[in-house]
Amino acid sequence: MEIDDVLPCRKFAFSIGHFLNDLCASVWFSYSLVFYHRVAKFSNSSAGYLLLIGQVADALVTVFVGFASDRTKQGEYGKRKPWHLLGVICVLSSFSICFQLENESLAFILPPFIYYTIFIIIFQFGWACSQIGHLSMLNELTSKDGERVALNAYRHAWSIVANIFVYTVTWLLLDKNQTNDNTQMNANVFRMLTHIIIITGFFTSLIFHLGSKESPSVTKHCKSLSSASHTWRDILYDTQFYLISLIWMLTRVISNVSQVYLPLYIMDTTDASQVDRTFIATGPLCVYISGFITSFPMRKVNQYLGRKKTMIVGLIAVLLSSFLFWYIFSLNINFGISIRFTILIGTILLGIGITTVQITSSALTSDLIGQNTESSAFVYGAMSFLDKLANGLAITFIQQYNPCSTCSTCCPLFYRQILSFVPGVTTFCTLLILISITRIHSSTQWIDSIRQSIRSLWNRIMRRTVKVIVTKIV
């Protein structure tokens, strides 16, 4: 077996290593505003501030962890896994508290807003440690492009499984805990849901730490193939880094905005007589199932079509879904296509598109890192920083101009515009950036040439300066 082939058991252990984070992220984005506003009784603005604090904390911590992880020495337990373990401990100890009502005895000591802020920051710190540790470990497991794409695909598949798991468990808990006291019902549901997530995430994290192993031999092999050691400063010289960072960010905006506003689109844009209310759950489920199926052939598709063409296929799928969501009524009136069928096809295309662009953007990032794994955590940290801030700002901006509180009749058109135009425009921007990207595999040589050119220019300037000074003195 070659040095950079990954055993199937290690592939499985690695791919499930982010499952705890995915479970927590699904609850965080889907239900945090519901809990803090309707259960913990914060105002809409205070609930929004708690979410914003979490996003900003996550964005800042990713940069710190990226720098620190790259500077961590290779020990017996590895270089990346200790950061992942630290993150798991923080998430397991804080996440359930973020979704439980504050003890009345503590309310006299800490105001509820400060109480939740403390545990949200601890949770987001742990989440960032696990994310960056897991992502940066991928490039150190293998140097093969196909292996890296496969690992990214398996990782994304488990992310989809996590979302399906959360929605299924929530549905079962809501069905089981129907009571007349809605506040108490919600508190019980959140407590049981977070406990189930913590227990499940503990065992999947245990599988990751027992079954995966960092390979110093692969890291040394990568360094031997690289002509020079590259630091984060060298990465900043590469224009490809900025272009791929924008693609990473935009693909995450497409995914998160669609995830947040798809249920609202189905609920407010369509009429109950046209679409059964169960489509509020069926729609997102179609996105995740189609995405889950799409993730498996991604390795072969990337090998056959290449990065750019694969990304374009995913972007076209997103554009088609946006087209269907916007012309949903025209298709029904002019061609007799049922609204339920249009939603079904649109969500399937959306799932295919999101999965394709996210896996391919991760593959582009792996290509950018190449053999220079010593800076991989910085790259992922910087991109995650942009991702978190962009999504937070996008959703905040959309909500700022949400007319539903003052004009209920404006909601159908508003959510229709959001689900159609935001992913559509973002897709066009991604396509324009993608066109400007050159071959990623030449990025290492490009960085080397830039470094040599700068050093040569600096040496010439210094020699000329010294010559002029000496001439003046003489």
Image (cartoon, rainbow, N blue to C red):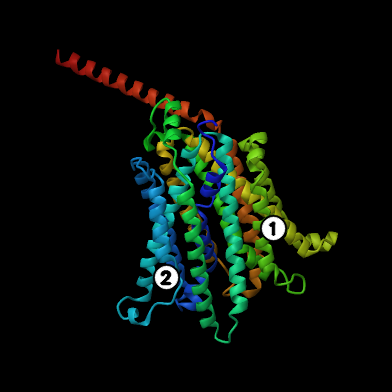
Query: Residue visible at 77% across and 74% down?
Result: 273
Distance from label 1 to label 2 (Cα)? 34 Å
Amino acid type, callout 1: Thr
Q: The disc labelled 2 sits on which kind of residue? A: Ile
Q: Are marks 1 and 2 in contact (CB under 8 Å)?
A: no
Where is residue 86 shown, x and y percent of the image? 38, 55
Q: Which mark is residue 347?
A: 1
Q: Outermost residue toward the left?
A: 474
Give above or below for 463 relative to 46: above
Res. 265 image quadrant? bottom right
Residue 272 horizontal/vertical position (percent): 73, 74
Residue drawn at point x = 50 percent, y = 52 percent: 17
Spot occupied by residue 18 in the image (x, y as percentages of width and height)? 50, 53
- Left or right: residue 285 compared with residue 11: right
Quadrant location of residue 375?
top left
Badge 1 or badge 2: first in the primary sequence: 2
Query: Within 10 angstroms of label 2, few (less than 14), some, or many (20 or more) residues?
Result: some
| Quadrant (top left, top right, bottom left, bottom right) of the N terminus | top right
Q: Nearer the viewer, residue 115 or 210?
A: 210
Q: Is residue 372 left or right of residue 346?
A: left
Find numbered disc 2 in the image and state the secondary structure of the residue it sits on: helix
- The residue beneath circle 2 is 97
Q: Is residue 361 visible?
A: no
Q: Residue at x 63, y 40 (%)?
A: 299
Give the crowd class for mark 1: few <14, some 14-19, many >=20 residues within 10 Å: many
- Give the quadrant of the C terminus: top left
Q: Secondary structure at mark 1?
A: helix
